[in-house]
Image (spheres, coloured by chain):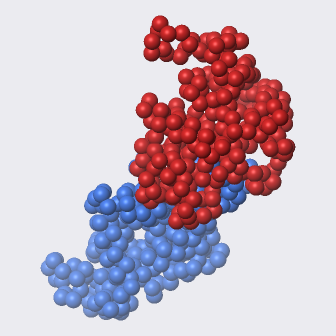
């Protein structure tokens, strides 16, 4: 607990439920996240697991301040970032990055890969950091001149990773980054991410609905159900002694290659 | 937006070539009108009045498309009329495009009160009957080329504003816009460097459509005698004059009509063709 990079206390996120808005008056509030408290230690990988609609993506987007929290505090590297305005947040932005779930939507379709990676660096496409980022994610440097639609899904996701790591951030949120990929690209992207975490000393929040992926990558896991944390354990303990019924259900839903082998 | 990569492999459609060819002919005619027009477009010669086009009996050599009731050469008037048509298309089209697109981008991206004000303004604006609006406007500010252009811009910016706002709203939901925010871009920079390149193909297609519409509006205003003074030949003015003698000399009406039709059609098709050819994204 002493070396926490990011501390989240009593986080609550609510949105207006426009579908049930009465003709007059305000729309009722829909609670997406409720009383979320956890911390992420430096150079560790935190897994955030949960089913559809459990609030994982909202949590990830709140961590990078894309979604405004209704209540609670976010303390990043000793600094309270909960109430920071867009302008005040700007210097911190490049220390906190997000890799998006859908790489097609996350990459501007009319910019070349080089410009997509260079823009957050405020650099030209010829900047050596662009080439280095492409090297890091195992893409040929010639890809800098291509457009996102010319790449495969796995390659696009690598570009998303390259853009995030090019800034040398302290903290990255990876939001279901392999769920849109086929199994072999999944494995490649995961291996790549694991190596980058090790080599660059990244702190990572890895969001997934797939516990088998979490097991490979994470040190600690929190399990979300309906916007609440139902389980917060080191990854080994989670798989041996899940404390909550929902976690057991998730564990049981992992397809087993060999049914005789128990987890 | 103009990137050759996607274009190399795809064949440019016939519509891009045909419409481009026609627009090039019109543009050349407009630029070199005094050089290529066989006669002075204003010169009257009552002895040569209502001469038919060259393939009909009674045609006079040198008057390819015949003459009107005052003996003025139809072809020469068409060529000179292209000048007004193109000036109106370019200036009014670009003016409309700049004003409408800017407001549409702001409304679609910034939302909030800016969007509410702009959108309500567009709604109110579009409820006026456009041609009546133009006629009233010109009656107030007086006739002339500038007035025609101002009238078109004042009426038609809403077309751009609506479409660009909708497209911007659409693009603003994409993750790359969120990504720009995470990268710490200012909102202005996000709008100009991330969203604008994605709205630009729509704007270009709309611009060429608008140029066609500007030509039509100018013709309509000429038709009701509210455009340019009569000593400057315009297609709309020729149609109006030709209507009076339609039973004696149909060619005075029909040739400007065909020219107008082809030009408006070409503008619209040219825009679509450009979009097909130069948009690097295969959606």
Q: Position of residue B238 (x, y in %)?
A: 39, 77
From the viewer's perspective, is residue B247 above or below residue A242?
below
Q: Nearer the viewer, residue A114 or B99?
A: A114
Q: Nearer the viewer, residue B270 or A257?
A: A257
Q: Residue at x 57, y 79 (%)?
A: B146
Q: Nearer the viewer, residue B194 or B134?
A: B194
Vertical relation: B63 (above or below) A163: below
Q: Is residue B134 above or below residue A241?
A: below
Count of numbered circles in the view: 0
What residue lies at 56% left-to-right and 45% top-to-bottom?
A161
Quadrant for residue A197, please give it: top right
The x, y position of residue B104, in whole percent, is 62, 57
- Vertical side of A131 occupied by B258: above or below: below
Identity of the residue furthest to the top in this view = A260
Q: Is residue A151 left or right of residue A26?
A: left
Q: Would you identify the image quadrant in which residue B262 lies?
A: bottom left
**Res B261 seen here:** no
User: Any idea which chain is the blue one in this picture?
Assistant: B
Residue A25 percent coordinates (x, y): 82, 32
For residue B110, side relative to residue B43 (left or right): right
Decide if residue B140 is on the left or right side of residue A156. right
Judging depth in this view, the residue of A53 and A237 nearest the camera is: A237
Quadrant of the rendered image containing residue A141: bottom left
Chain seen in red: A
């Amino acid at each position: 607990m002493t070396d926490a990079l990011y501390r989240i206390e009593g986080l609550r996120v609510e949105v207006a439920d426009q579908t049930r808005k009465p003709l007059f008056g305000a729309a009722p509030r829909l609670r997406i996240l409720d009383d979320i408290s956890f911390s992420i230690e430096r150079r560790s990988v935190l897994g955030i697991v949960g089913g559809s609609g459990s609030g994982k993506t909202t949590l990830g987007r709140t961590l990078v301040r894309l979604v405004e929290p209704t209540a609670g505090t976010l303390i990043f590297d000793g600094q309270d970032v909960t109430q920071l305005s867009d302008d005040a947040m700007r210097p911190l932005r490049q220390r906190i990055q997000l890799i998006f779930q859908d790489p097609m939507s996350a990459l501007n379709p009319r910019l070349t890969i080089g410009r997509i990676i260079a823009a957050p660096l405020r650099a030209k496409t010829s900047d050596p950091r662009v080439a280095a980022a492409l090297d890091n994610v195992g893409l040929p440097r010639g890809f800098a001149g291509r457009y996102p639609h010319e790449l495969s899904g796995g390659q696009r996701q690598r570009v998303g990773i390259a853009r995030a790591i090019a800034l040398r951030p302290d903290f990255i949120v990876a939001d279901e980054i392999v769920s849109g990929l086929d199994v072999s690209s999944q494995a490649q992207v995961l291996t790549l991410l694991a190596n980058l975490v090790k080599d660059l000393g990244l702190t990572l929040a890895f969001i997934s609905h797939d516990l088998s992926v979490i097991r490979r990558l994470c040190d600690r896991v929190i399990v979300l159900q309906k916007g609440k944390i139902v389980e917060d354990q080191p990854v080994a303990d989670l798989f041996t002694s899940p404390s909550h019924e929902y976690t057991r259900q998730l564990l049981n839903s992992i397809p087993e290659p060999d049914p005789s082998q128990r987890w | 937006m103009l990137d050759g990569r996607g274009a190399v492999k795809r064949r440019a459609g016939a519509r891009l070539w045909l419409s481009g060819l026609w627009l090039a002919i019109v543009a050349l005619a407009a630029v070199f009108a005094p050089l290529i027009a066989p006669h002075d477009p204003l010169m009257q010669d009552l002895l040569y009045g209502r001469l038919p086009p060259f393939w009909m009996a009674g045609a006079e050599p040198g008057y390819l498309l015949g003459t009107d009731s005052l003996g003025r050469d139809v072809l020469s008037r068409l060529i000179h009329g292209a000048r007004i048509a193109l000036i109106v298309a370019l200036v009014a089209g670009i003016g409309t495009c700049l004003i409408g697109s800017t407001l549409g981008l702001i409304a679609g991206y910034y939302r909030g009160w800016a969007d509410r004000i702009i959108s309500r303004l567009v709604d109110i604006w579009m409820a006026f009957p456009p041609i009546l609006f133009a006629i009233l406007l010109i009656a107030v500010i007086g006739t002339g080329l500038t007035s025609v252009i101002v009238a078109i811009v004042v009426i038609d910016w809403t077309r751009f504003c609506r479409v660009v706002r909708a497209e911007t709203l659409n693009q603003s939901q994409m993750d790359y816009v969120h990504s720009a925010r995470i990268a710490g871009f200012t909102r202005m920079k996000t709008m100009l460097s991330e969203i604008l390149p994605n709205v630009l193909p729509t704007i270009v297609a709309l611009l060429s459509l608008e140029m066609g519409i500007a030509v039509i509006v100018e013709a309509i205003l000429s038709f009701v005698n509210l455009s340019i003074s009569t000593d400057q030949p315009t297609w709309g003015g020729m149609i109006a004059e030709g209507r009076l003698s339609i039973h004696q000399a149909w060619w005075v009406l029909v040739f400007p009509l065909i020219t107008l039709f082809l030009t408006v059609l070409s503008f619209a098709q040219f825009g679509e063709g450009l979009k097909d050819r130069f948009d690097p994204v295969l959606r």
